[in-house]
């Protein structure tokens, strides 16, 4: 079974730009969660989507948004990028009925200059 | 405020030298405690879930235990391939459904 895939793997942007990251979950998984990982803050939960609806949300500003499509693929968007948005963005999918068991993708490393 | 703290931040062991990693948590309404392994440049890999105090789970050289305030990841006779960052996370109820709070991890280096 193919794992969680994320594209692109690496990205360089400048302040003020916006960025869209993509995540394809494991086949059959309908829950997709997004996390931001930085050396200082560690892994922080952004939001979770289930059946195209945002089911849960962390404490991030509205510049961070996401969506999920009918095939469970998800995208995350960050608008008006700031230097502090430089991080590894991880996507995780969960099997039905087991939201706590999260299978992570390799992440997208975003550098904001 | 829910908090998950891991110690030590970094640990260097010689091959075969057993040790334990600590994850202490201050949360309300723990639903589960998770351990992950993360290799450089990769996403975290799920290892264990513990649900109640006294529970233990084992996988190869790793054993995870849980008390009411902390969890330990015991590594017995580690090998260099066990080198990685180990993350723990506490799953709790929240106003928006649930919250998964991660610790900052313990970076483990096992030398031959």
Image (cartoon, coloured by chain):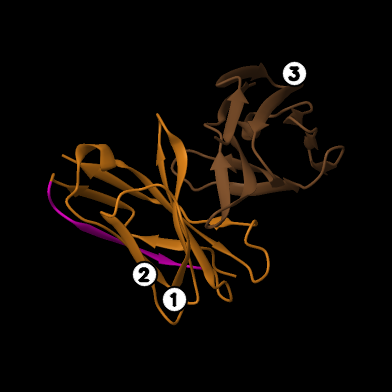
Vertical position of residue B70 compared to residue A112: above or below: above
Vertical position of residue A27 compared to residue B26: above or below: below
Q: Which residues are magenta?
A: A16-25
Q: Residue at x 60, y 19 (%)?
A: B8
- Label 2 neighbour load within 10 Å: few <14, some 14-19, many 20+: some
Q: x and y percent of residue B45 in the render?
A: 59, 48
Q: Which mark is residue A67?
A: 2
Q: Nearer the viewer, residue A105 or B8?
A: B8
Question: What color does chain B have in the rendering?
Answer: brown
> Which chain is represented by orange in the image?
A
Q: x and y percent of residue A29 in the render?
A: 57, 71
Q: Which residue is mark 1?
A: A52
Q: Quadrant of residue A87?
A: top left
Q: Are marks 2 and 1 in contact (CB under 8 Å)?
A: yes
Q: Which residue is mark 3?
A: B17
Q: Residue at x 69, y 45 (%)?
A: B29
Q: Nearer the viewer, residue A74 or A57?
A: A57
């Amino acid at each position: 079974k193919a794992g969680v895939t994320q594209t692109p793997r690496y990205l360089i942007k400048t302040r003020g730009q916006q960025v869209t990251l993509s995540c394809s979950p494991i086949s059959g998984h309908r829950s997709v969660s997004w996390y931001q990982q930085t050396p200082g803050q560690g892994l922080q939960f952004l939001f979770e989507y289930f059946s195209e609806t945002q089911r849960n949300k962390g404490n991030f500003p509205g510049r961070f948004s996401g969506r999920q499509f009918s095939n469970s693929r998800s995208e995350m968007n960050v608008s008006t990028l700031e230097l502090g948005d430089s991080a590894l963005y991880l996507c995780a999918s969960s099997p039905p009925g087991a939201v706590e068991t999260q299978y992570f993708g390799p992440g997208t490393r975003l550098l904001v200059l | 405020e829910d908090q998950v703290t891991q110690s030590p931040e970094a640990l260097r062991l010689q091959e075969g030298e057993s040790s334990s990693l600590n994850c202490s948590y201050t949360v309300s309404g723990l639903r589960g405690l998770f351990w992950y392994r993360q290799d450089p440049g990769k996403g975290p890999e799920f290892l264990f879930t513990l649900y109640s105090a006294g529970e233990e789970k084992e996988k190869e050289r790793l054993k995870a235990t849980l008390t009411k305030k902390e969890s330990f990841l015991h590594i017995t006779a580690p090998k260099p391939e066990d080198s990685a960052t180990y993350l723990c996370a506490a799953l709790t109820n929240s106003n928006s459904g649930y919250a998964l709070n991660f610790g900052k991890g313990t970076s483990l280096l096992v030398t031959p």
